[in-house]
Amino acid sequence: MANKAFQKIYTQLEAITKATVSLKASGVSNDELALVDGRLAQVVKTKGDLVTLQIFAGTEGIPTNAEVVFLGGAPTLNVSDDLAGRFFNAYGEPIDGGPAVEGKTVEIGGPSVNPYKRRQPSQIIPTGIAGIDLNNTLVSGQKIPFFADPDQPYNNVMAQVALRADVDKIILGGMGLSNDDYLYFKHEFEAAGALDKIISFVNTTEQPPVERLLIPDMALTAAEYFAVEKNEKVLVLLTDMTLYADALSIVSNRMDQIPSKDSMPGSLYSDLAKIYEKAVQLPDGGSITIIAVTTLNDGDITHAIPDNTGYITEGQLFLRTDPDSGKVIIDPFRSLSRLKQLVQGKKTRKDHGQVMNASVRLYADAQNAKTKLENGFDLSDYDLRCLDYAKAYATRLLAIDVNLKIDDMLDTAWELFGTYFTKAETGIKQELIDTYWKGN
Amino acid sequence: MKTTGKVTGIVSNLVTVEVNGPVSQNEICFITVEGTKLMAEVIKVNGKNAAVQVFESTRGLKNGDMVEFEDRMLEATLGPGLLSSSYDGLQNDLTTMTGVFLQKGEYTDPLNHEKLWDFTPIARPGDKVVAADWLGEVKEGWLPHKIMVPFAFKGEYTVKSIAEAGQYNIDKVVATLTDASGEEVEVTMWQKWPVKVAVKGYQEKPRPSKIMETGVRAIDTLNPIAEGGTGFIPGPFGCGKTVLQHAIAKQGDADVIVMAACGERANEVVEIFAEFPELIDPHTGRHLMERTTIICNTSNMPVAAREASVYTAMTICEYYRAMGLKVLLLADSTSRWAQALREMSNRMEELPGADAFPVDLSAIISNFYARAGMVVLNNGQTGAVTFIGTVSPAGGNLKEPVTESTKKAARCFYALEQNRADQKRYPAVNPIDSYSKYLEYPEIREYLNETIMPGWVNMVEKAKNIIRKGKEANDQINILGDDGVPMSYHEIFWKSELVDFVILQQDAFDEIDALCPLERQKYMLEIVMGICDRDFTFEDFEECRTYFKELINALRQMNYSEFKSERFYEYQEKLNNLLSNGK
């Protein structure tokens, strides 16, 4: 932190709310950090000589004569290779008992990459999960969230994906993590022997919610260091972005802003986009891939947070429990990877796209058959075959505990087609049928 | 003397400036922050205080920082070299910027002032001209780019002299004009125009009378858009808005395409950067990029510039329209632009309208759509700006302010539907809710019947009717069960599936199927409707289903084969066999 000796000190607050304080001060710049009664705060508004500061740790117990010291700049992080293997809080301070990191001091939340200088993402990140690799292939430089209800094992799935993914660095940004989940991640990373390529920025539920607002920028500033300066492939995990957005709404509410849909600030889209758009494939080979978690309220994706997220991210992965097989699957209907066509059939076998579409279409037919069954109607032979197929498809491919290579996933799908359907029923291009059809 | 001022308040990118002289609404100013000049626009004035929206991050800005006003509105620079360029929302050339990251306060010139162009004069000394009249021409790629009397010129001028044919850069004075009072003005190859003001300079704006081919069956066959028409594509995320828009951009029958990526994903723009230079325009055989301008203000770029981006794009379109060209503007997505308006209105503490959007949202949107259209130029030639915007309705719910306001302004509606997308029935355009008002225009109906085939419009209406009836039949089947309805229900349902699978659905990622020219659309619709006209007798619904699935399969294989190739005819033969052995 900057030298306090030459800083002007203020001791008279004009107003205090639950998240902000206001005082008269001069020479203050927008986004500048300050210490209010020893707590970190940031300038969010100036009007004449009245300055409003957002206090990250909350304003509980702050007196009107609190000491306010302006620190002369926006929040920063020291970046160097020493970040690897370390755990930090929202301010970028070590929480693992180790020494402070030395390195270049950079402002967090820096400028955007010139879209013209970006490269088109083209490298697969295989995960072994067919719900991802087969149906919603991940590509480096992509940003994609898990949409999951709070009772689903999203953090476990994310940890599993992260540890299987072939990347140089994994950066965890934990917002409102329960202490148990924090320890889970720590344990999983240690158990995998991967600690040296992992960096964590963690805000737990025990810490003030507004602090969370710093986590994504901290994590992504570290990611940019490794991706831009070291040309590394970096995977950033952000969980849970719903709690991040909740913190945004707290601050905007305290600043008397008019809320838009679902009490969220009108700028929610831009606020989330600023984070997710840090995902990038850089010209010199480095990349930042973001996998996030957005928890849903009872599967409701029309809520402003998942809704805005869906418009920003390159797809979404829905977790749901398949009632027939009892397994947690990645829902083939609502899940989508927008970048999959950049690699499907190009970096993978040429039947990939059509196999994926046909298998999902037939799974949809099974859902129709199920509706019929529930309404008490007789099922046709085709309906019955669809139902059998759906169960096999969910168990052998969609379930998240399956770990296969992509070619094996495709072969499994052809095997299922051959078992349950005729060639015409799959609607697949003839030349692919000629090459890959299994069965008669 | 220029008006100046100093910063007195900051909330995010809304800055209050105390001014020492006159300022006008939408005037551009520059704020100096630590030696860097940031561009901003006046959006409200109250006494000596002007509220300005800054087109950049305001981090580090202080009260007391100096502001200089420019006495002009936000302008686009118009001249040869716009095509195949990539700009941000303020028309900075993204390709000439240094560094991987966008630097605050880095502004680049939209046009290359060194490049030489082959100029040929059109006007002759002594000619009487007004704004937008053609003085000369250069070749921009393969397009004739007209050098015009600047749009801002008022009244009639006489051409005093005009440059000879030759190679010049855009700063060359190519004509000298004399105004009514005898004063001389010089005209170079480029001009500026305020983006928020519609370009006039034409005689009239008649009703559109032709359609613009897109190669997408769900549009051209079912709900065609007119040349100079307007349309919009609302849809929840994941329904294929962008894929559909890119398909239209690649295949649309237009001379010039302007794509405004407004507050959307950067990787989608990268896709355009990566693919367009490789792709060939199916209508001219030239590289797509040669006829394309990209305006790109992605979601992480400053919000105020996002609002400007759609206006910059429209102004460039109007400029090319004034040359007698067919221009297509695609904006993805207009909802992001509306959100940018909402953010500013919110910071200015205006009383909000529905969903916290500004109350004049509807008026702003319809004003913008009204800038599209076909025009008859002063010299009798025609030009057109066709505009298709996407809308990203919150929660996929079409009853929200942006969709509703756009519905009032646009003439074509292509509703993308979650349900169809879930079933991978792409493009997920709902065939029942979508419409084209142009199909009601007698001149368009006549045009279609003349250029495609006699009776075309009736055939299309019949196809739509089958889809509607098929949906009703399917609802009944779902309620009463397969056995609970007469066979005719199954038959009509499967006829509607035939239309759906063969005509509506189209594989945007298949090399052949992606582009379906009108001739081919006609060929396929005739076959499909021929089948729909037949009466079949089936033993049971299972037989009906199997039979139609086979028909659909043969027809889809035709869609995947090169038109009228050997393979194509093979599948048609197969289809004919099915039909002649049929029921």
Image (cartoon, coloured by chain):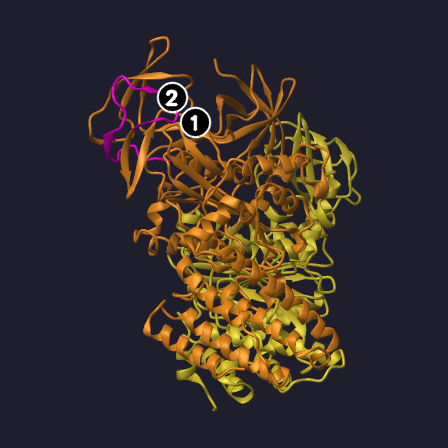
Looking at the image, which residue is at 77% across and 33% down?
A15
Looking at the image, which residue is at 51% across and 87% down?
A418
Check the image and name the residue furthest to the bottom.
A440
Screen quadrant of the N terminus of chain A: top right
Please report the bounds of the magenta region as a residue range.
B110-135
Residue A67, percent from left and from top? 71, 36
| Tag 1 residue | B201
Residue B130 disc label = 2
Label 2 crowd (10 A; few <14 / some 14-19 / many >=20): many
Chain B palette colour: orange
Residue A242 occupies which quadrant of the picture?
Answer: bottom right
Q: Is residue B118 above or below residue A55?
A: above
The chain carrying label 1 is: B
Residue B20 occupies which quadrant of the picture?
Answer: top right
Looking at the image, which residue is at 74% across and 73% down?
B479
Chain A palette colour: yellow
Looking at the rendered structure, the kind of residue marked 1 is Gly
Residue A42, percent from left and from top? 64, 40
In this picture, residue A319 sits left or right of residue B385: right
Give the overall secondary structure of the magenta segment.
Answer: loop
Residues under labels 2 and 1: Cα distance?
8 Å
Residue B110 disc label = none
In this picture, residue B390 sits left or right of residue B475: left
Circles 2 and 1, Cβ within 8 Å, touching? The answer is yes
